[in-house]
Every structure is written in C-alpha cells, then in structure tokens.
Amino acid sequence: MKKIAAPGLLVLYLLILFSINISAQELTEDEKKARRKAKNQEKIDQGKFMITPLAGPAYTPELGFTLAVGIMTSFKTNRQDSLIQRSSAPILAGLTTTGAYFLGSELTTFWCHDKLRMYADINFKNMPDNYWGVGFREGKDTPKSDTTTKYTRTWVQFNPKVLWQFKKRWFAGANIDFNYTKGNEACAGVTADPYYAEFNDKPFNGGSGAVFQYDSRDMPVNAWGGAFAELSATVYGSYLGGQNNYQMYDVDLRKYFKIRRDGRILAVELRGRFGRGDVPYGEMSQPGSPFDLRGYTWGRYRDESMFFAITEYRHMFLKRNSKVGSHGIVFWLGAGTLGDTVDEFGNWLPNIGLGYRFQVQERMNLRLDFGFGTESRGFYFNFNEAF
C-alpha cells in the first residue's frame, strides 16, 4: 500500500475539518431560526410587547407613488388575563412623489377580561390634492386640471371610542371626534365652489356620540368567523369647540364565513354613512379610502351620505405540515353610491381588486392591495384587513 505524503494528510485533514465546520454552521443557523420562532411564540403566549418594522412602495390615485414605512406593534394589556386578545397599534408613515406626507395609526385594545375595549383612529396628512366638488355628477364630469380642481389640503383626525361589554358579545359606549380640514393654494375652480367657500374658513370640527356594537368575531383585526354590527350617532357643534353644526350616523354590518378550514374566509360588509345638517366638505362621505372601494381616487366622489357593499375572499396558503402559513391572497368585488339623501342613491361606483397578505405577527397581516375603479386604479400598502 502506498503511503500518503504528509502534505496530503494535512490537506485531507483540513478538508474534513472544513466540512465539519460547514455542517456545524448550517446546523447553527437552523438552530438560530428555530430559536427565533420559539422566542416569538413565547412572547405571544406570555402576552409580551412585540414590534415588527416593514417598508414598501405603494401607488394611489390621489397620492401618486409612495414610499411607506410602518411598524406593527402588539401586546396584552394584562399578561395574566387569559380572556383578552392581543391589542394592536400599527403605525404607518409615508412620503410621495407628489410631495405629500402622512402619518397614521389605528389602535385596538382590550382590557378587564374583555369587558372594556378602547379604539382610536389618529391621522395626519398634508398633500397636494384635487377637489371636484360635491355630488356624483361633479366627481364624474369635472375635469381634473390645475385650474379646475387643484389645491393643497391639510387633514388631522383624532377619533377615540370606549366601549363596555354589558352582555356577552354586546357593547355600548361613547366616541369623541376632533377633525380639521384646511385647503390652501386653491385654483380658481376650487375657490368658486360654494361648499369650499362656505367651510374652508371653518376647518375645525368637534363632536361626540353614542356607539353600540355586537361582536362575535374570533379576532377583530383578522376575523376567521363570526359577525360584527355597529351603530353610531355623533353630534358635532360648538360645545366641543367645533365651528360647524351637523350630525353623522353610521351603520356597519359584517359577516365572516369560514370555508372548510382556517385561513379560507368569505367576508361581507354592508356600510352606510348618513350626514345631516351643515356637513363641511372635508367630512362628507368619500369612497375610495384604503378601507372601502380601493382603486378610486379618495375624495373625487363626496356627498353627505354614502352606502357601499363589498364581498372579499381571503385565502391563506397552508404549510407542508397543513397548518396555516404566512402567505395569502384575496379577491374582492364591491360597489358604492352616494347622495345628499338616500333618495338620491342610484349612480353606482363598481369596484374590483386583488391583494397579497403576509403574516408579520400571529393573525396580523401586511396588506398589499391592487384595486380598480371606474377610470382609476390604486396599489395600497397597509396593515390588517380592510374590514
């Protein structure tokens, strides 16, 4: 038998050692990944605070191309309380190619064995915008241009509500709404509009009201089953410092059907928002937000009252172990109408779209939606489901 020279033995030894190190390194990376998952699950089980940062592009008809940066935060208000769900407070900020910038959060919290629930919508937006006027016909027929619709808008909203569970699944409480809409650098077409001329120098509104809810959803931010109904009435006026006197009535009905398994859901929403009194142009109902008829220019169509209906199919893919995974798709179909009163409803705005979902925390998704409206479309980056 031939002897292996010393240099050959050294090379062979180094190759074996290198192979062992690679295997050990691969095993270590797998262990790290498993440990990270176990640590996150431990935080969820123990109700600890979790934060997930994300960033991505978006495009909406009113904002143009947007770079959005967000964080998903979730926590339990009482780690020892097994009857409450995890609360969430996603925060989203962005800059756009039109020069707009915005910041917003939608707080959902659970307290006292789920006897107490507290919500809040907090928003700030400053943006070059367009104002077509009030009514379906104005939104459809007014041409968009620097002389007919262009202006700059600043919008601020602080809208908390507190609800108490007086009977299983039944809640009652109160809300407060402070909002501010101010237009600047308006073109001739906008300044000539009677609603803009009447309300733009009275930009601040304050109101409070009553809220009633029925909620049998398994998880409010991403329901896989159950139903939700909310009725609210808010009165705005000078008693809270507001500059305009009006009332807003809101009816929101939702139902979620599980199709054979977890993560495969058919969701339906019917919603009506009805204004009375001197509703300022900035607080009129405006379909086209990231939470209703996605794809329309938010603000093109506005009036004192609105109704829309949406059916959405949500499908989360399964992992190899047949458990619900982190990736999913959605498809939706909807339509809305608006008018000064319900009698004026009838000109419908059709809406269709599809989206992608990525689970950033347990049952809390990053939402990417691509919606189509009549002669418009939009791509949306947000957290949690639209409804």
Image (spheres, helix red, strand yellow):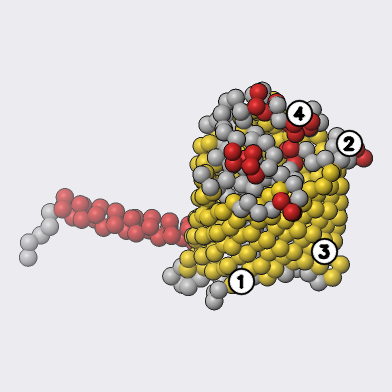
Image x and y of residue 116, in percent: 82, 60
Query: Horizontally, is 38 left or right of 243 in the view?
Result: left
Mark 1 residue type: Phe
Give the residue at mark 3: 171
Residue that sits furthest to the bottom in the current view: 260
**CA separation, marks 4 and 2?**
21 Å
Q: Which residue is drawn at 55% across and 40% down?
A: 61
Q: Quadrant of residue 145?
A: top right
Q: Which residue is drawn at 65% across and 44% down?
A: 136
First reached walking from the N terminus: tag 3 or tag 2: 3
Residue 197 numbered tag? 4
Q: In which quarter of the image is residue 194?
A: top right
At label 4, counting other C-alpha atoms closer than 10 Å, the crowd grade (few under 14, some 14-19, many 20 or more) is: few
Q: Which residue is drawn at 60% across and 56% down?
A: 335
First reached walking from the N terminus: tag 4 or tag 1: 4
Mark 2 residue type: Gly
Image x and y of residue 67, in percent: 53, 38
Give the residue at mark 1: 257
Q: Do the residues labelled 4 and 1 touch (CB within 8 Å)?
A: no
Residue that sits furthest to the right in the current view: 239
Q: What element carries label 2?
A: loop
Above or below, comparing residue 12 to residue 374 in the picture: below
Give the residue at mark 2: 241
The label nearer to you, 1 versus 3, is 1
Query: Horizontally, is 190 left or right of 20 in the view?
Result: right
